[in-house]
Image: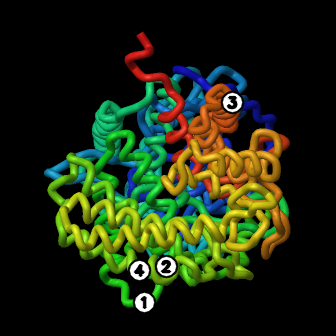
Amino acid sequence: MDQSSPKQKPANATRDQNLDLAVIGNSTVAALLDADATLVWACFPRFDGDALFCSLLRQRVKDDDFGFFAIDLADHDHSEQRYDPDTAIVLTRLTDSRGGVVEICDFAPRFGRFGRMFCPTVLVRQVRRVSGSPRITVRLRPAKNYGRSRPESTQGSNHIRFVTDEFVLRATMDCPVSAVVEERAFLLREDVNFVLGPDETLQGAVSEVCRSFRENTTEYWLEWVRGLSIPFQWQEEIIRAAITLHLAVYQDTGAIVAAVTTSLPEAPTGGRTWDYRFCWLRDAFFVVNALNRLNTTRSMERYIDYIINIATGNEAEHLQPMYRLNGMPECKESIVDTLPGYRGLGPVRIGNQAYEQIQHDTYGSAVLAATHVFFDRRMVGRANEALFRELEPLGRRARRFWDQPDAGLWELRGSKRVHTYSSVMCWVACDQLAKIATRLKLGDDAARWRADADRIHAAISERAWNDKKKSFVSTFGGDQLDASLLLLNELHFIDAQDPRFAQTVAAIERELKRGDFVFRYIEEDDFGAPENAFIVCSFWLVDALAALGRRDEALALFERLLALRNPHGLLAEHCDPKTGELWGNFPQTYSHVGMINSAMRLSISWDQAY
């Protein structure tokens, strides 16, 4: 077995919390595993459900702690963990001090069945003896109501039921149920299997069901990866990033979560803890755009359905920046006082107040995502005037609000200004509608939307440019910078050959870059000055450098950014610019999108490789 670096664990010691975690999932549920294969985070019955496993936010230090599922090996000496290549299946080997070895296989089943995708609310754990005489203790301790208490439980001949307010979790197993209930150590002679899912009787022997699930899930992922259009360079890194993005797409509706966690702090201080288990229209566009570049058009189609359902059924004056996975608008934010937070750094938040904010860039994000349908021949069957008419209300809102104050893409909670990025994305909405109308040969509509786009473009070019700084700035008439200005070329607002773009990039390098890393902004906000760098912003700089012809610098920076990834190739939202330590919600879709886009831009072509 290919192995990551062994993780040493002294007897009776508790591992310090970090983000060296692996993610498993199937686009319905997701879970995080630490280096010892302890399940430390999983929500049921979907990404934004109750965190039945939440020890990531309440470190396991006492016998009476709960919110985790551990397979503890007696006399545990070290652990080795990796992904089964090109899959979302995690293999962990635990070795004891006498040479006994146990392998744990963790995954969520996903494969085609009966003409549809089978991706149930189920996690599977398989435990097998590799060598020696290992003794294990199974500690299955879910929580309910985000760690407020342990659920009531009942047991049958081969299962335990855990009753929560939102979900009844049934753990079906083929080891003695009493050994799990009593947490009694036993000698592992034969394979042991666990199926965690809804309160339904398992159809068939546990071992046979798990074997079948694993074989079919492995086949699904290998086939999915075969269909990717990946760059020649960094293939392993991009495949892992693509699988991670795929896990964030909610199968039922096509919504895309920003991350599968809540409240992992952006930094050690400041209280910047947010719930990211919702669909931000801005983030989701970047995700489906990256997946589309990799030839996974299905995610694009399903997300367009999601966004069109929201846009056409929305009678409110403004489009929200984020929605629940089922498309419902309310994401009310509250504090969970029973969870201390990652490393004790709270508060832990459920819901996100950002749904109440005004963020005008959402109109451009929605239209830009749908634009692919009209120009990608693989989806040409949906490119018609009816869809164009459904998008036009978004353009009319963009035309109306492009120069109005909002919270901006960085979601400032205490102030509103006219943000350049929001205005540019309103221009994008009009610009894309003009291009779509031209494609559909709707001459009058094309002329009207082009006139609106040109008018807005001219005004932004004048009001967002700071002649003293020789740079575009983050707000109209302002003098501060933010990293979104690096996207002006990517969004086709300004050509890379325009001197103003090079000047803006130079200004950002001067003011927002700390070592290799670019901050979103450096001015104080509602929580003080930012402490850590937002990882995707550094990938934006890579792309900007490449666009400016500074390819060697872009390549060197990209390689240094790849070094940030944890042992499984995954990224969080932020990093410490001094140490490179990962912070923030995990795994963060935005960061993996940045990695994919930069790799696609920088890699040599397949023709050049031979």
Q: CA distance from mark 3 to mark 1?
A: 46 Å
**Foreground mark, 2 or 3?**
3
Pointer 2 and pointer 1: residues touching (CB < 8 Å)?
yes
Residue ID for mark 2: 320
- Within 10 Å of the Cα at label 3, are there few (<14), some (14-19), or many (20+) other Cα atoms? few
User: Of 539 and 188, which appears nearest the observer?
Assistant: 539
Q: Amino acid at mark 3?
A: Glu
Residue ID for mark 4: 328
User: Along the polypeptide, which appears first: circle 4 or circle 1?
Assistant: 1
**Foreground mark, 4 or 1?**
1
Residue 116 drawn at (x, y percent): 19, 53
Q: CA distance from mark 4 to mark 1?
A: 13 Å
User: Of 71 and 47, which appears nearest the observer?
Assistant: 47
Q: CA distance from mark 3 to mark 4?
A: 44 Å
- Within 10 Å of the Cα at label 2, are there few (<14), some (14-19), or many (20+) other Cα atoms? many
Q: Which mark is residue 553?
A: 3
Residue 449 drawn at (x, y percent): 35, 71
User: Along the polypeptide, which appears first: circle 3 or circle 4?
Assistant: 4
Is disc 2 placed on a helix, strand or loop? Answer: loop
Q: Which mark is residue 416?
A: none
- Within 10 Å of the Cα at label 4, are there few (<14), some (14-19), or many (20+) other Cα atoms? few
